[in-house]
Amino acid sequence: MYQSFLLWLAERLGVEPAGSGEALEPAIRFEQPFSQLTLIALVVAAAVLVFAVYRRETTAPRPWRLGLAIVRLSLVLLILFLLSEASLTVERTGLPTIVVMVDDSASQGLSDRPADPDLARAIRDLGAYAPGIATNPTASQSQSDSRASLEIPRIALTQAILSRDNGAFLRALQAKHKVRIETVSTATRTLAVIEDEDGIAPALEAIAKLEASGSSSKLGAGVRQVLTQLRGVAPTAIIMFTDGQTTEGEDLASAAELAKRKGVPIITVGLGDPDAPRDLELLELQVDEVAFKEDPIPFKAKLLSMGYEGRPVTIRLLEQPDETNPKADRLLKELTVQAPADGTPLPLEIVHLPEQTGDIRYVLEVEPQEREIQLENNRIVRVVSVRDQKLRALLVDGQPRYEYRYLKTFLERERATIDLHVLLLSSDPEYAEQDRVALATFPTSRDDLFNYDVIILGDVDPSFLSAGQQEALVEFVTRKGGGVMFVAGEYFNPLSYKNTALEDLLPIDLAEARDPSVAATVPPFRPELTVEGRASPIFRFGDDAISSLTIWENLPPVNWYFEVARTKPAAVTLAVHPKPLGGMDRAPLICYQFVGAGKTLFSGIDETWKWRFRVGDRYFGRYWTQSLRFLARTKLLGQRQAEIVTDRLRYQRNQPIQVRVRFPNPALALGIKSVNVQVERKGEGSRTLTLEAVPGNPSVFEGALPQGREGEYVVKLLPPPVLEGDLPSCTFRIEPPAGELERSQMNASELRRVAELTGGRFHTLTSLDGLLEHLPPPQKVPLDTDPPIPLWNTWPVLTLFLTLITLEWVLRKRKQLV
């Protein structure tokens, strides 16, 4: 009542109204104040004297005397008011600040499936208000597993709390405060400042655009920065929406000490599941972009597990005919594996034989488990172009040895997929007329030779091939991308190729090479696959690598091999002799190398026909079919003029990124010392990176890419050289540091400790209703004080003085007291 009167008085005296976000605090101030004791004494004395005087006035009625005494006493008080030189002071105050801090680090993009049904229900209920989130109504009615369909990121829950009911939460804060909304992750920035109701709508728009993109959580540094910026006037409180996990810099509890000294309570709202996070992730899927019908396609990937160690999980390979309708996915194969230990990737492989041709979408997925924090990383989609194309093969041998006979018979039966021609150098001239697949001579025309995709050279005397034919064979590999397989023999292949054009095609070093059977009998043995051999499609005999290896280790032994001391530097060894010989490393038996645009393979054994024992062509046929496909792939699929790769598909921030460009045909890179690639982050601009030629390998160029922001990147090769068709490209992804997603559970103990230390409160999504009720009372912030307005010498006060004197005189006159 009194304050309302003073506000009315200030308005009457022409005080300027309060501005936006301001309030007026009028008060009476005395320029010549009496001491409190003196004032009391004067008032008491005056009261006693006045009442004593009028008590002796017995001629007037008692009520009349009482009224006169009150008038006289009022005059005394007014005189004291005048003597103290009273004035009106007006202090202008602003609304106190309250800070809302929103964690927008990458961990806030996770979705939680808590075991606590109350927390799951709270998440589901808030999801109805989250921007762009639609909860599953069926799941919301389920009491037994209401968390099954929760796909609501934590950042969306914060958005829902702040924006639901047209921003009711912010409106309640703005009624008594100036609201400052800050985001905190890698850095702390001001998202919005709400000083009046007009500021709520823009703030809600900014909140709706929030993304969980921060690569680290600097929670303690964020709180300290806010308190430092507001060091003039401390905020009423800090309301913090976060999971409480600090991944970089000062922790939250340390910054809370500063808040305690400043008297600022921190009210923490915990987001996330307090239990340890659980997740399954498929990554680094490797599969050929182009394959052949009924040719094995290995799908290789890695499985990462967090919180499911030892649990059986199902891996499925699906065909996706309609990407808009996941229910139409067709199951091709599945396998069950034990989830690995946390952070330890488990290699996976599923082999599929396509029966249809065309561009086929394949999906490799791991079956979702209960309470996984992410589901989008459970699936990887790849498009594979499956072709139905015959392989043209030329088989050349000197003698009709067993290897030649069984191989010729098998390949003739594969006429649906292989177009075969053979040349047996020791045959009669009439043989070519009697056998439909036989040739009389080695192709003399380059065009005729280049029509083949792969050539198998058995124990062939190089003198049967002219220098021109040998040069054409080299060109067939290096320029046309063809494949040549050398099958060693007891007479010519490979020792006789020394100092010929064919020596350059061999992946082995002929120095110290020999036929060990010349000096002694070779005991039976089984070749042993190397690590590269186990991963090679050539030896894919079973449904997976383990079964294939088991089959290989149980194949019949062989009794002859050609001993090689070493391979050429660029060669890859697939199989070796099981025992070291002569103090040397184990002799390479099957190896290959890239030569220009094509590949060549050397087989130091010629008794693969023995693998037919009791199983027919099952493994013998697979070995040869897959070997020929392997060698002919480049030519069949069209020679890639260049290929561009990164050393990994996924990087964490600050990890080095190596980019490599390789020209299968070295002629394209002649005279070029460097090439340029364009690096583009999806949705943003691009930059250019220069790659330098690798010393000693002028067809390969390498360079390091400076680190960029998190996201998907595309790298494209730029001319020169000018290539035909689309620019070669590759993709990779930069992700936040592992720490940001490693500890993604809610750190409830830290949040509770911070709240208790600063005098705040710790809330979860199940206890939000009491958050606003327990806010500390706002303390208004003084802004300015208007010049005092004197009251004692104003005409209303003087008029009141004269009125009181006149009133007493008239009343006394009327009762004849004067």
Image (tube, grey):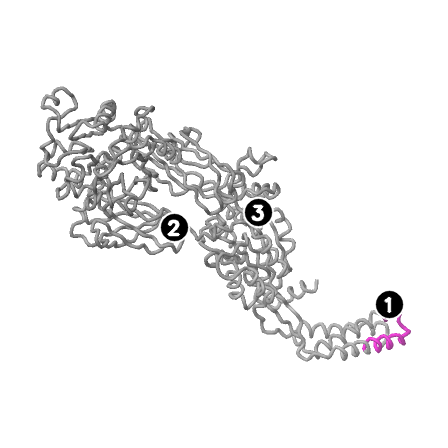
Camera-nearest label, 3 or 1: 3
Is residue 51 located in the magenta-colored stretch of the structure?
yes
Decide: marks 3, 2 in contact (CB < 8 A)?
no
Image position of 656 with respect to 813: above or below: above
Give the image location of residue 217, x and y in percent: 49, 56
Camera-nearest label, 1 or 2: 2
Give the crowd class for mark 2: few <14, some 14-19, many >=20 residues within 10 Å. Answer: many
| First reached walking from the N terminus: tag 3 or tag 1 | 1
Q: Relative to 227, is 62 on the left or the right?
A: right
As rendered, which of 393 and 149 lies closer to the eye?
A: 393
As rendered, which of 179 and 737 lies closer to the eye?
A: 737
- Residue appearing at x 53%, y 36% in the figure: 136
Q: Relative to 387, is 209 on the left or the right?
A: right
| Quadrant of res 127 | top right
**Residue 210 in sight here:** no
Q: Circle 1 is placed at which residue position?
A: 63
Give the image location of residue 730, x and y in percent: 31, 45
| First reached walking from the N terminus: tag 1 or tag 2 | 1
Cα separation between marks 1 and 2: 97 Å
- Type of the residue with mark 2: Tyr
Segment colored magenta: 46-65
